[in-house]
């Protein structure tokens, strides 16, 4: 297992002169008439052709640093001190007009989520042409020609067609290619990639990172890769800058930082990333089979009408799975693989087109009355991906947790209060959380609330739909640990939906790999991970960031 | 939209008009008193009870309500709107005579309202000065609470009597339009501006705006070439609904400024309980309203291509 010491293009070319030099950067935000410093003296440099990763969890100030470089801090943000030099130009103190000339032309930005980073009412061609038009690059026909070249250059087939399409007609990966094309259109010296792949499927992630890397080599541009994922940083960066609470904790060559982290925090991040990317999940004890498995699905088919005269769209095709009591079954697959449709059929949101679904002793296909459906939803609870949108922002946590009890008339006022306290304790939240509002909690704390809300009605089955995808890696680990503990305590059966095989490897006993509505591979997670039988599974496994270069043991872990 | 969707939308539109016709008919018939009595029981005419009965029969006022309904409906379908009870002329002619004035007033009033709303919204969201921003953002709430008749009187007081800029009576055709158009425009511009400010703020918070800024675009470029079109769809929807306001506004405006028009005609017809005229005006208003909203529905997908997509059940 080798980690490349030098990357093609990294140390060739111009000189050792950095193209971007950030010195003692201090940034503050104002809220409610109070200034809070969030970045306290951050310094680093990037040379042409080099990739520097800015790594940290949310709130570490990494994105703020990136925004400060491109001069696009939020309205309440202010650069308090420090210097930013791009080539020969000092960027701090430039007028807005002068800065506009830099943006797009000398610094390109690849944003975080391609799905909301393109103007929805503009065609792809118009959006891509915009950067050229803003900088008065050339005549209309020349711009049109250049747009098609760029689209082809970033690997989109049929540029003519793509240029005329709207963002909603393209996949996330294709949109990110368009945004990359826009970032490199004017051949900038620096490309800032702000979490460029965290919103993408794992196999697409790899291709997008490859594309950015290829373009870097070709243009000898410097890349500032902002990421929370040390796995990605390890694979892609020449140097790593680890940030925490607005300060640089550690910085150095990737190889050195990975092999020999000097700070405990870096070691923790590494350990979490390594555990997620672990080559082989440790086998878990095999539970005793029960007479009536809490989840039994056979030959489930789910079709959707696509309009008159057209063949229905088959989202789920002959899916079967059985999950034993007290175990975790994972469904993995990329977006569009049918994971979500399967879950929706299982919870009775859609009537299955055909097939048998039995959840916690109820035949889902045969449910008739509202009462029966309600009973199903009590026995099988759902925890959703985004803890920021799944909690009512105006309700206190106590009310959020008491609501399902009220709905199902499970407890009186005093009983509800006792249960709320009990379940807050179960998910390891302090008792005073009850009186707080969701916005006062962190992402991890909110997800704990969501889990408590699911468990409070004492379900047998909990369906977890990407429950940790929106969370930082250290928080992910905590939530996964909590889920395992709760399972052992309460004998719960989990159905765990995820696109992230690293996470799946840590939590599940059995796994089904889905692609285009079908289960392409299923079995014990340990087996599937060590001996994948399909190329698709192998591709998914290989795409876990950091896995290909993960050292067998990590120091300080 | 697919052809089928357009057809079903058209069907809905016709249904709304039919319901408006029926609703108006039932309500107008249920009114206590009637226009016939107002006109002919006038002691000055000195008609006897028997004579009045005869006149009523001649007008068909004694036919059963369902017969009258069918008769009126049949008339409307072929473009015969009946006769005014007050002065005996054809309702169609009465309306046709004043419609152009009102249409002119309405079109100008609505255009002014839109311009005013866009001006307020753009300045309120573009200004950097927080003091100015808040002031402008508060303006629509003030506009919305202003009663039309009061506004009309204040405008006349200020512009005609105090400043002497505009003649109250006998001004030219353009001069005489300025104040009525303003009176009509201000209350309509307010909700439009509110929605527009809100939509612009929502759109400006979306990540793609930061991406456009990162391309080197100026704030003006972002606002005019990216944000505006996104913010338009919700505003357009409200604009369709506000056309209803326009009709109500025309009644007050035309009455206060003494202009001939549909609004004035309505006011007189109500005063005289001229059921036939009112029936036609209600249906006219319904048609205008329905057509406007139909247009909004047909135009929206051209502005936001996502609306074109037939939604696949997710």
Image (cartoon, rainbow, N blue to C red):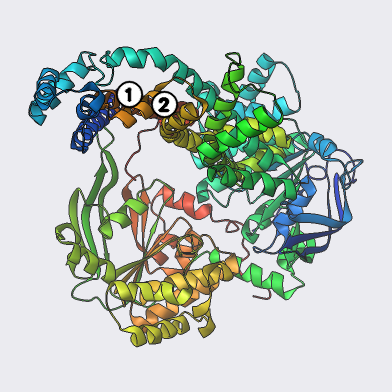
The image's mark for residue B265 is: none
Instruction: Check the residue under mark 2 and report the chain it is in.
Output: B
- Residue A231: percent from left, percent from top: 62, 59
State the residue position of label 2.
Answer: B263
Helix, strand or loop for disc 2 = helix
The image's mark for residue B284 is: 1
Q: Is residue A132 above or below residue A294?
A: above
Q: Could you tell me if residue A554 is visible in this image?
A: no
Q: Count the labels in the image.
A: 2
Helix, strand or loop for disc 1 = helix
Q: Residue at x 73, y 42 (%)?
A: B127
**Closer-to-camera residue (A404/B260):** B260
- Residue B155: percent from left, percent from top: 61, 33
**Closer-to-camera residue (A416/A193):** A416
- Which picture quadrant has residue A292? bottom left
- Residue B172: percent from left, percent from top: 60, 13
| Mark 1 or 2, closer to the camera | 2
């Amino acid at each position: 297992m080798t980690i490349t010491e030098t990357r093609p293009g990294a140390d060739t070319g111009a000189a050792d002169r950095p193209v971007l030099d950030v010195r003692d950067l201090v940034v503050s935000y104002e809220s409610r008439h109070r200034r809070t410093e969030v970045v306290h003296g951050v310094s680093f440099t990037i040379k042409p052709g080099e990739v520097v990763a800015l790594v940290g969890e949310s709130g570490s100030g990494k994105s703020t640093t990136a925004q400060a470089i491109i001069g696009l801090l939020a309205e309440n943000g202010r650069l308090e001190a420090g210097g930013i030099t791009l080539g020969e130009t000092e960027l701090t103190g430039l007028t807005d007009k002068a800065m506009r000339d830099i943006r797009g032309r000398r610094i390109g930005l690849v944003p975080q989520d391609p799905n909301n980073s393109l103007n929805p009412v503009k065609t792809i061609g118009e959006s891509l042409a915009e950067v050229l038009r803003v900088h008065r690059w050339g005549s209309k026909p020349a711009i049109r020609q250049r747009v098609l070249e760029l689209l082809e250059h970033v690997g989109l087939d049929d540029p003519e067609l793509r240029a005329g399409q709207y963002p909603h007609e393209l996949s996330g990966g294709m949109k990110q290619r368009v945004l990359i094309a826009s970032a490199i259109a004017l051949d900038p010296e620096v490309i800032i990639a702000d979490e460029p792949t965290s919103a993408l499927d794992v196999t697409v992630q790899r291709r997008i990172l490859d594309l950015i890397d290829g373009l870097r080599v070709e243009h000898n541009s410097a890349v500032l890769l902002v990421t929370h994922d040390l796995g990605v940083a390890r694979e892609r960066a020449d140097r790593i800058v680890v940030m925490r609470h607005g300060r640089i904790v550690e910085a150095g060559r990737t190889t050195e930082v990975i092999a020999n982290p000097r700070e405990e925090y870096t070691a923790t991040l590494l350990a979490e990333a390594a555990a997620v990317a672990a080559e082989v999940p440790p086998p878990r004890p095999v539970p005793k089979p029960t007479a009536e498995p809490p989840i039994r699905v056979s030959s489930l088919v789910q079709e959707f009408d696509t309009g008159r005269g057209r063949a229905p769209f088959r989202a789920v095709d002959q899916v079967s799975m059985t999950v034993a009591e007290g175990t975790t079954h994972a469904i993995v697959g990329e977006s569009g693989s049918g994971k979500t449709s399967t879950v929706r059929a299982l919870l009775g949101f859609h009537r299955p087109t055909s097939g048998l679904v039995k959840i916690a002793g109820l035949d889902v296909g045969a449910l008739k009355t509202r009462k029966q459906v309600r009973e199903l939803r009590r026995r099988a609870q759902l925890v959703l991906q985004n803890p920021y949108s799944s909690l009512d922002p105006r309700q206190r946590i106590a009310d959020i947790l008491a609501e399902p009890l009220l709905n199902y008339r499970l407890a009186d006022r005093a009983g509800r209060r006792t249960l709320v306290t009990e379940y807050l304790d179960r998910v390891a939240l302090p008792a005073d959380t009850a009186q707080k509002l969701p916005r006062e909690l962190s992402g991890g704390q909110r997800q704990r609330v969501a889990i408590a809300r699911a468990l409070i009605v004492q379900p047998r089955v909990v369906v977890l739909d990407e429950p940790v995808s929106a969370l930082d890696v250290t928080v992910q680990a905590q939530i996964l640990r909590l889920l395992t503990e709760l399972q052992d305590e309460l004998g719960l059966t989990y159905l765990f939906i995820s696109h992230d095989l690293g996470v799946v490897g840590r939590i599940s006993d059995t796994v089904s790999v889905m692609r285009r509505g079908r289960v392409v591979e299923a079995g014990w997670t340990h087996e599937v991970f060590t001996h994948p039988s399909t190329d698709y599974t192998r591709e998914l496994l290989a795409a876990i960031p950091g896995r290909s270069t993960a050292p067998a043991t990590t120091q300080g872990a | 939209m697919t052809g089928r969707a357009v057809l079903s939308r058209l069907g809905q539109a016709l249904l709304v008009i039919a319901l408006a016709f029926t609703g108006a008919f039932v309500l107008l018939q249920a009114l206590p008193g009637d226009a016939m009595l107002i006109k002919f029981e006038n002691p000055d005419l000195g008609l006897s009870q028997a004579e009045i009965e005869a006149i009523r029969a001649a007008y068909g006022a004694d036919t059963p309500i369902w017969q009258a309904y069918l008769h009126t409906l049949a008339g409307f379908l072929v473009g015969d709107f009946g006769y005014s009870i007050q002065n005996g002329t054809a309702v169609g002619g009465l309306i046709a005579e004043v419609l152009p004035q009102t249409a002119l007033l309405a079109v100008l009033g609505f255009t002014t309202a839109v311009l005013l709303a866009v001006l307020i919204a753009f300045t309120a969201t573009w200004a950097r000065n927080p003091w100015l921003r808040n002031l402008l953002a508060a303006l629509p709430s003030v506009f919305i609470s202003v009663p039309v008749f009061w506004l009309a009187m204040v405008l006349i007081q200020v512009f005609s009597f105090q400043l002497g800029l505009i003649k109250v009576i006998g001004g030219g055709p353009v001069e005489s339009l300025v104040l009525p158009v303003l009176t009509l425009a201000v209350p309509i511009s307010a909700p439009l501006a509110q929605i527009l400010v809100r939509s612009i703020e929502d759109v400006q918070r979306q990540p793609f705006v930061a991406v456009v800024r990162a391309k080197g675009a100026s704030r003006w470029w972002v606002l005019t070439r990216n944000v505006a079109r996104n913010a338009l769809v919700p505003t357009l929807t409200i604009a369709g609904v506000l056309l209803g306001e326009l009709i109500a506004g025309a009644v007050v405006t035309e009455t206060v400024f003494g202009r001939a028009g549909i609004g004035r005609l309505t006011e007189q017809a109500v005063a005289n309980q001229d059921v036939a005229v009112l029936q036609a005006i209600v249906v006219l208003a319904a048609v205008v309203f329905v057509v406007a909203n139909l247009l909004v529905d047909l135009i929206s997908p051209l502005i936001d291509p996502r609306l074109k997509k037939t939604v696949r059940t997710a």
